[in-house]
Image (cartoon, helix red, strand yellow):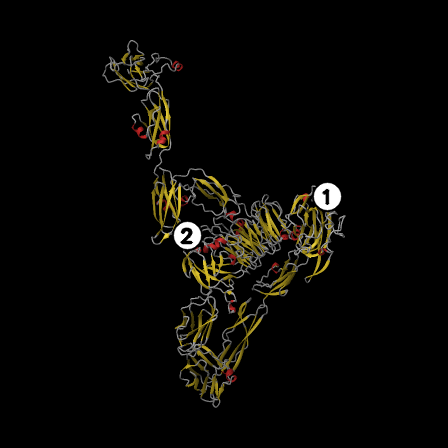
Amino acid sequence: MLLHVRWHGFVLVVVRAGLVQILSIDPQNTNSCPADWQLTTEGSGNQVCVRSGFPSSSVLIDSYAAMVAENNIKGRRIFDRITGTGQIYQKGSTDAFETGTRDVSSIDSSDYVDGMSITMGTPRSHIFTLALGTSYDTALGTAGMCPCGSGTQSLQCGGDAVPAFLAGQEVICDSGTLGSASLAWGSRVVSINFDVSLSVTSESFEVRLMCDSVSSNEDVGILELFLNVDEIEDTTAPVLSLLGATTLKAEIGKPFVDPWATCVDDLDGDLTTNITVAGWVNTSRFGSTLLVYSCEDSRENSANVSRLVLVVDSGLPSIELVGEARLCLEDGVNYIERGAICEDEVDGKSPAKISGSVDVDVLGDHYVDYFCVDSVGNNFTVQRRVTVISSEMPGDLHMASFSATVRGSTVSSAPQVHLADVDPRSDFSFNWSDAVVAGTEGCRFISISTGSTFVRRYEGVEVLNQWNLLDGEQLSLPQGSNTVLEAGLQDQTTYEFSFDEHLLISSGRTGGSAEQRLLISTGDYTGPRVVRSAPRAFQSAWPLSESLSITFDEPIWASGNSSRMRISEEETLEEVPCDGSTSPRGFWISVAGSELKLEMVATWRACVEVQVSVDAGCLVDASANPSEPLQLIFLSSCVLTVSPDRDQTGVAINSPVLFSFAEPIEFQENGTGIAVEIVGEREEIYGLQDWPLVYILGSTLTLDLACVTKYCRIFSALPNATLRDFSSLGFCSNLPPQECKGKLHRVSLRDGLLLRNGSWPPNVNATWGSHDVPAQFIEDPYYFTLEPADYTAPTLLVMDVSVTATGVDVRVQIDEDGSVVCAALSDVTGACTADIELLQEYSNSSCNVTRSDCIHCDPPSFGCITRSSMWVDDGCSGRFWLEGAEVDCQSSELDTTIHDAAFASVLSVGHRHACALRKEDRAAVCWGKADYIDPVTFSAPAGSFKSIAAGYVHTCAVDEATELITCWGSDLHGETAGPGGISTFDYVTSGYQFSCALRSSDHKAECWGLDDSGQASPPDVAFLTISAGYRHVCGIQLADYQILCWGLNDVGQCSPPSGEFLSQSDRGEPLPHGSLSSGWAHGCAVRKSDQGISCWGDNSNGQTDAPQDARFIQVSAGHYHTCGLHQVLAGQGPGLVKNGTVRCWGLDTFGQSSPYSATSTPSVGFGGIALDDDYSCGLCFDGVAYCWGKDDFGQASPPTDSFSIFGLPDEFENVTCQSDSAASSQRIKGISGARDASASASLVYESTVGYAEAFLTLTGLSEGSTYGIYCTVEDDEVPVPNVLSNSVIAAVGREVTMPDRTAPQWVAVRSVAPAHRGAVWLTVASDEPVKAYCVARRDGEAPPTRSEILKSSSLGYGVLNLTNSILLENLALDTSYDAYCTVRDLAGNWAADQVLAESKFDFHVARDLVPPQLLSTEPSSGSTVVCEADGFEAGCKTTLKLIFDEDLHRGVGNLTAVCLNNPGICLDLDLPMETETSTHGSSSILFNELTVHFTTPLTDASNFKVVIDSGALRDMSGNPVSLDETCVDWIPATAKDALPDACLGTFAFWTPS
């Protein structure tokens, strides 16, 4: 159905959208309720929604959101129908409209009914009410039943009536409870169905559940509820009206200024900023352009209007005469035609056409015309006047005298006399020798000149008769009294008056007057005039202690008369005599040269209007000319004092600035205007919005940029404090120190900042506003200089180190304020050997502050190698445990992913929409005008892509997996069809209804779509990159990096400069996508040689005027603007590495060339940029898109949620790190290596002694250990302190060894083997290397003291070691002992007596039953003995040695050398052991060694065996020695192996032959 409705002056065709559901409540199926209701179960087990509060709970419905969700974007928010259905349970004794305590005054009541209301808008407008009443019950009465009427569905009725405000409204009443009073849920469900006609405008509905009793008594339960609305749609387009004519003319060669248009919508209002225009006017050539203006409202109704612009040349040419326009020429003298020059803005210069001639024989005026016509017929004419005058000789008429005014009197003089002191305002009379009349010829002048300059010329034929200047013999010149004839003569100047011949004619003679000249000099007739004053007139904020001065144009003197200077300060008046005497308040006048000064002892009153008036004649000049009266009005300063002081130097960067006013002040609304300027460099403005960095307490205004004051620190912690970025750097926040410190700063208070508090008197003069505090320190600047930047490390004057009982004391002195850290390092030279342990992995804050772990990067390789070059700005980071210290390491991100939008096409901007590739999954995300993205789906298709390009109403992308082209959007010219075929592609770019892509195989271009200018017909060339513009494409050739373009070239967009073009990062990585960009009708590229930018094509708005003072890594061109991404090389300053700043030039109508503004600035730098029509976008280092410029369709409002992180996946280079093994500042601070102890302190410079000193103590060091003691010092320079160099740190280090004052803490004693033969071996261990001393005490004896141990004759002791082996001997057999040991460490510390006592070790010395065992022999068994020298005597005298395992003594028996071979020749020899000597030799015993010497020669070349009779030798316990007699050496080896003990203890040898 169509309705015609008059709506705000528009004829509106009403279209309904049909019923749209705006509310669906179904808890039984969804198991949920709206937020302000709660879920419960009614009596029959169904889930229902009920109130969550008393007496009511409401659900608000945003109809706008509901309509948008249903894609109903054309709705006018005018609803003419609402329908609803529902199923409702009631609980307890709901009593409908029963009066009593219930408020039934209006629809706004929260309990006017037990039931449900549906309302609309604010204030609430009724739609529908459901009342739930009771059934009849004697206990309840009838008031709570439904009222009888058409809306009652209950079987019983008769209750209280419907409230008056619901009369005629849609009301249903029902009862779900049948029977007696109850608190239970009713068994019957109440069904409702309503259909209400409306005529209201609203964007919100409310459904309210209410009861006049708490939920435990009664309630309303929604089983289901559905609401639908029918909304009138807006199909009316906005009214688009041209400003100016529909056909306009534009001058060729001049910029066309579009008068634009207006757009007004009946709902949205003024939409002028939404207007877009297609087409542009090219004023470089004649022709016509049709501009099509479009405007769309928020409901996508659009209007179009066209304007025809004709490029024409309507400018008239100009003519410049060569020579004067008026010439005087004597008759007979040839006239030389000099001509004239025509100049036209289009055609240029050319000679003018000439008509007319000059007859030099004819006296009078002649005219020559000069004529110019340009190429389109515009013409212009000028004329030259040539007067031919007579060359006849003059007659004898001459000047007899002249007169002028001198000091008030008329003085006559002969013309030959130089008349002096003439009044410049004098009239002159010139007397001639005869009566005169004016001559008849032109070109006869009266001239007044000074030097070679004419002051005034009067042409006689025109002036003399017109002003009646002739009377008989007199010619009058009233230049003083006639303003028209005034010559403007000045004081004290010499002038020449000249009268041309034939100017006058004698009335009684023939011939004209002769030429006449005379000289006059003017005198001083003008009083002193004011040249300037300080303060100037109406100046505000004149300093309170500053005197007043007035400068005149000549020297002055005080007149000495009674005249006065009067000073009025609001209600006070002070008169200051002009004679130099002092006024009551201490003012007096002084005069010096041309300056008058008002000297003062007092000060001006603060913030008042001061009026200074000076009487006439107060001053005189050298000629006694009096001064004129004068008046000066100014406003005194409102500031009493400032801190820091004016012109103070060395001001701390965190110092607050305080302005103390005379009276209380307050901020103006939104007051701003505290200007802080680094003089000549940069300025920041602060104000109320910066509270609490800026605040007022009473009469003091404080600017605290470092937030060091107590007030700022307290209030900055409050949740409503919206501080701009600040730091302890104060004035130098966000600046490198060299750009701030040591600089001259100026602070001023601008207008619009402050108001006088109500206690101040208002300003009298309207110039300053009644209560405004005017600007301060504008004309009397307030300057101070910050402390200079310090780049010098402190000088370490003293470093004393001393070892104490508790640690190491260090005394440090330096030459300035600062801090010191000292550490004890146990190893400063050895290489690190420990494995590294990862403690935490994280992403660098400068890379992405929102990430908690390292995403999309390979694990960095960390190891124990050089860490000196760890400064990287974007990468994965980790904290590690290495060499006993925590160290931070980072891996460096590749430039190609830092600047991903400059390396590849991951961000692209179209006409009214933009797209980017999501970093996480390479999906395409688009924003802006929905139908420009895609007219059907309004979004990009699913998929993963490697390159994307947003063009005019279409988009194309390269599929990451298949490398095929996918396009979407409008398809007017096949632009979404793609290239077709089976080729794969690396890169795509889109322009106006066409696109191009580079093949993977050969990097040649294929294009598709609109081809009306050849833009889709590329050359057969391989390209590094290409970029599509409006109707043209440019590319960088792979072969030589030259640029080649094709397509439309009407303004030179396809005529690029020659040269090599390639963008590179600061580390030399190529960035192809950033190297070249094509705009609508211009292009730009980055030069390979110097990374500067060259542009070509249309420059109508300065879009090709690229700056040449910087290096760039990317350039992007839009419609009439261009932007570049700066390249900042590493090493150019702290924090500047790859800082990603953007610089734009060209048109800035919508802010498209202003990426940084006071209201919106990205928090991190840009990695790449993209431009189109009249907006721009950038991709920040953190992957967030940021746009600026025109935003009428949201094209400059990219998504900012956590899923919208764009760009290439991060790629990283591995970086290694180490723990410092040398003494360094970082290791001393515990950053890069282990330290054994440390201490820190602040140092404050004392000027009286000339140094700053600190005392530190290093504790917890190990006794006896050696340490290097090293200190690092740094000053308090901010933001980066100057630190002592590592070489100095190493040079001044000290080595100390900590004394060992700790005795061994424990002693452990064990035996090596059971004690026997009167001896025991003990093992003594301790907690450090010691020397042990032990004794044995019989069981039961008292433990010995250390002194008794050391004096004992049976002492056993060891050597310095962690473990000692000690032998205790001479112990009684079969006896139990206690061993006690004391120990002494290397430092001489003895173990305590308690340790000695605890060292007790019990052992028993057993009885000896084991015979001595032969340990070794000399010579060894089986070898040949050495014989004594006996000449040639037969036999061998020799000596044998037998060594046993214990001491021996003699018994009874023989030792026999038994001969084993040579029977009959070889004899046995016996040696009795009872005596030392015998027949055949001798024997001796030394402890466990038996030595036998045979004096009887043994048979040569014989084998002997030693046999000892059992009992011949015994040990100390009487156990006999016995060498077995049964073992013979001829027993086979196999038998010996079978009988291992057969030869035990035997000793055999050979004698030599």
Residue closest to the eye, 1092 or 1016: 1092
| Residue 837 sits above or below residue 705 on the image | above
**Badge 2 local density, few (<14 within 10 Å), some, or many (20+)?**
some
Report helix, strand or loop for mark 1: loop
Report helix, strand or loop for mark 2: loop
Tell me which numbered mark, 1 or 2, is placed earlier along the sequence: 1
Total labels drawn? 2
Residue closest to the eye, 283 or 1310: 1310
- Coordinates of residue 390 in the picture (x, y in percent): 49, 83
Looking at the image, is mark 1 or mark 2 nearer the viewer?
Answer: 1
User: Is residue 1008 among the parts visible in the rendering?
Assistant: no
- Coordinates of residue 928 in the picture (x, y in percent): 60, 53
Residue closest to the eye, 1090 or 867: 867
The residue lying at 43 percent from left, 54 percent from top is 737
Contact check, label 1 and label 2, Cβ < 8 Å? no
Q: Amino acid at mark 2?
A: Glu
Question: For the C terminus, which image quadrant?
Answer: top left
Q: Amino acid at mark 1?
A: Ser
Q: Residue furthest front?
A: 139
Question: For the N terminus, which image quadrant?
Answer: bottom right
The dot on residue 230 is none
- In this rendering, position of residue 923 left or right of residue 1066: right
Q: Which residue is mark 2?
A: 1277
- Coordinates of residue 572 in the picture (x, y in percent): 46, 71
The dot on residue 187 is 1
Kindly report the distance in space between the C-alpha atoms of the residues bearing marks 1 and 2. Answer: 82 Å
- Coordinates of residue 542 in the picture (x, y in percent): 45, 67
| Residue 463 sits above or below residue 1031 on the image | below
Quarter where residue 1359 is shown: top left
